[in-house]
Amino acid sequence: RNELKIEMQVKHEIDELLRDEDAKDFTFEVENEEFKVHKFIFMAKSKLFREIMLKNPEADRLVLEDISVALFKLIIDFVYFQTPPNDDSDFLKVFAAASKLKIEKLMKFAEEKLIEKLNFENSHEILHLGQKYKNEVLKMKAFAEIKKEFGELPDELADDPEKFAEIFEAKKAIEEAQKVFKTKLEKLKLQ
């Protein structure tokens, strides 16, 4: 019970700190919107931010591209409060942003969610993401899902997501052509 009280007090103090505009000493710009934060908190959670600050301690601003305002707000909640993204989050984007900013706990959380939601339809995107961010777990799991659909494939293909994009598109085109053919065949049978 005492631990819960202490945890609640810490959260309350962090919340007060967050609201204290004078204590914020760094600005992130995301989609032309500014977010003032505390350097020391972001340095503790983001390896990339820590690297930037160690190279340039006087820096007070960073423009983030390829991250939406909504996603960055989610990142702030995670960095300050360890609040995980909710289940309807786009975990492909969460993983990419966490990888880009090197926020390891958020990367791991998003990786677990991606694996949990892995299916054939999203396996190509997850394989590509694993390849891009050198995440062997995502690559291996996504490739295994793809193999279930296509059967045995050479392992070298796991390192070439672009070839899979072509395979997926061809498979989709074949499925669409089969649907059209079935519809026309049914119409002919009715006549």
Image (tube, rainbow, N blue to C red):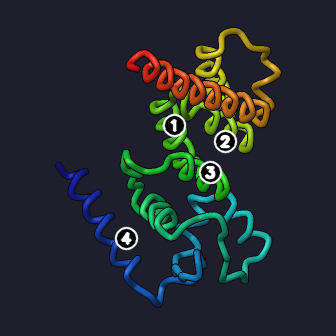
Q: Nearer the viewer, residue 75 or 96?
A: 96
Mark 4: amino acid: Ile
Q: Nearer the viewer, residue 114 or 187?
A: 187
Per the model, the C-alpha gap separating discs 3 and 2 is 7 Å
Sequence-wise, which precedes: disc 1 or disc 2? 1
Q: Which residue is mark 4?
A: 14
Sequence-wise, which precedes: disc 4 or disc 1? 4
Describe the element under mark 4 as helix, strand or loop.
helix
Q: Label 1: few (<14), some or many (≥20) within 10 Å?
A: many
Q: Label 4: few (<14), some or many (≥20) within 10 Å?
A: some
Mark 3: amino acid: Ala
Per the model, the C-alpha gap separating discs 1 and 3 is 11 Å
Q: Image height check: is 129 above or below 38?
A: above
Mark 1: amino acid: Leu
Per the model, the C-alpha gap separating discs 4 and 3 is 27 Å
Q: Nearer the viewer, residue 7 or 160?
A: 160
Asked if labels 1 and 4 touch by Cβ distance under 8 angstroms, the answer is no
Mark 2: amino acid: Leu
Q: In the image, which is nearer the foreground, mark 4 or mark 2?
A: 2
Describe the element under mark 3 as helix, strand or loop.
helix
Per the model, the C-alpha gap separating discs 4 and 2 is 33 Å
Asked if labels 2 and 3 touch by Cβ distance under 8 angstroms, the answer is yes
Asked if labels 2 and 1 touch by Cβ distance under 8 angstroms, the answer is yes
Provide residue 52's location: percent of width, then percent of height. Answer: 74, 68
Sequence-wise, which precedes: disc 4 or disc 2? 4
Q: Which residue is mark 2?
A: 129
Q: Which residue is mark 1?
A: 114
Asked if labels 3 and 4 touch by Cβ distance under 8 angstroms, the answer is no
Q: Which residue is mark 3?
A: 96
The residue lying furthest to the top in this view is: 152
Corner quadrant of residue 177: top right
